Amino acid sequence: MLALKIFVLGSCTAKKKFKRLDITCEVIDKFGREKLIEREDLKDMVLPARDMYLGGQHLYTIKAVDILRSIPSIECVDFYILSAGFGLLEEQTLIPPYECTFGIMSKEEIRHRSKRLRIEEKLLKILERENYDIAFFLLGVKYLIAIEEALKSFPTNTFYYFYVSRGGSRIIPRKENFSLIFIDKFKARKYHVSRFEIKGFLFYNLARKLLGQHDKIKEILKKPSNVMRLYLTN
């Protein structure tokens, strides 16, 4: 059996290892990431993107990614983070602490910033180049807006899972290779996590359950009903 290639896209979080409220979207746009990570007052706070964010969803996502990477039948797990400040980040890309979020932007502002950061262009290029078998998207509504147009042109050879609220589901086109995993406050309560953690927790829960399914992972992930069945098992 051919080994699986998996893509994971999470989002930046407000909670970070270091806090710098003065490094705003405007400051980032003026100086750029490369210059900011070299600044004397910031260089001791610079970290790989993977290590900068401390939000619950992100931490659960990291755990899930690490579990999936430990499974022999999975060739690779490429993890990216969608940052309102810096755009599409590879997990090891160095970044300074900053304060910039899509959460307080209007739909028009999000689309404008996404275009400025070439988020959709870069995302499509990665998906087309790497030819992934499976992709997981753990994005809130505002972050989905940043890739809304790109969703229409995703490669058809990959199967995609989106962890979304009902509101987020309205942004995602209905396609045969798109599967939605709905999240809400009631599901969060069921698993005793916050609504800010539930996407990451469910992804982590899936990864944990896939550990014992080495030879069946592709079969499971290509069929949403199998994934749902895994969630329902203890």
Image (tube, grey):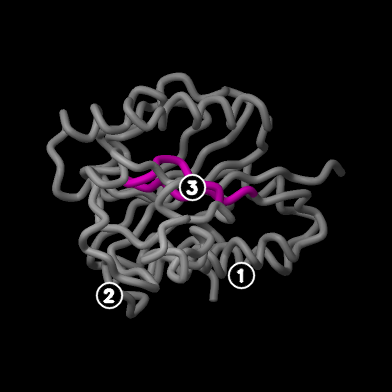
Query: Quadrant location of residue 13?
Result: bottom left
In reply to whether residue 14 is colored magenta, the answer given is: no
Residue pointed to by mark 3: 9
In the picture as drawn, the residue positioned furthest to the top comes out as: 153
Query: Residues in magenta?
Result: 78-90
Res. 67 in view:
yes
Q: Is residue 163 above or below residue 68?
A: above
Q: In the rendering, which numbered label is found on residue 102?
A: none
* Residue 123 image point, x, y percent: 50, 32
> CA separation, marks 2 and 3?
24 Å
Q: Is residue 167 above or below residue 92?
A: above
> Which residue is located at x 49 percent, y 46 percent?
89
Mark 2 or mark 3, which is nearer to you?
Answer: 3
Residue pointed to by mark 1: 208
Residue pointed to by mark 2: 189
Q: Secondary structure at mark 2?
A: helix
Upstream in the sequence, badge 1 or badge 2?
2
> Which residue is located at x 33 percent, y 76 percent?
193
Query: Quadrant location of residue 63?
Result: bottom right
Label 2 crowd bin: few (<14), some (14–19), many (20+), radius 10 Å: few
Disc 1 vs disc 2: Cβ atoms closer than 8 Å? no
Quadrant of the image for the N terminus?
top right
**130 on left or right of 224:** right
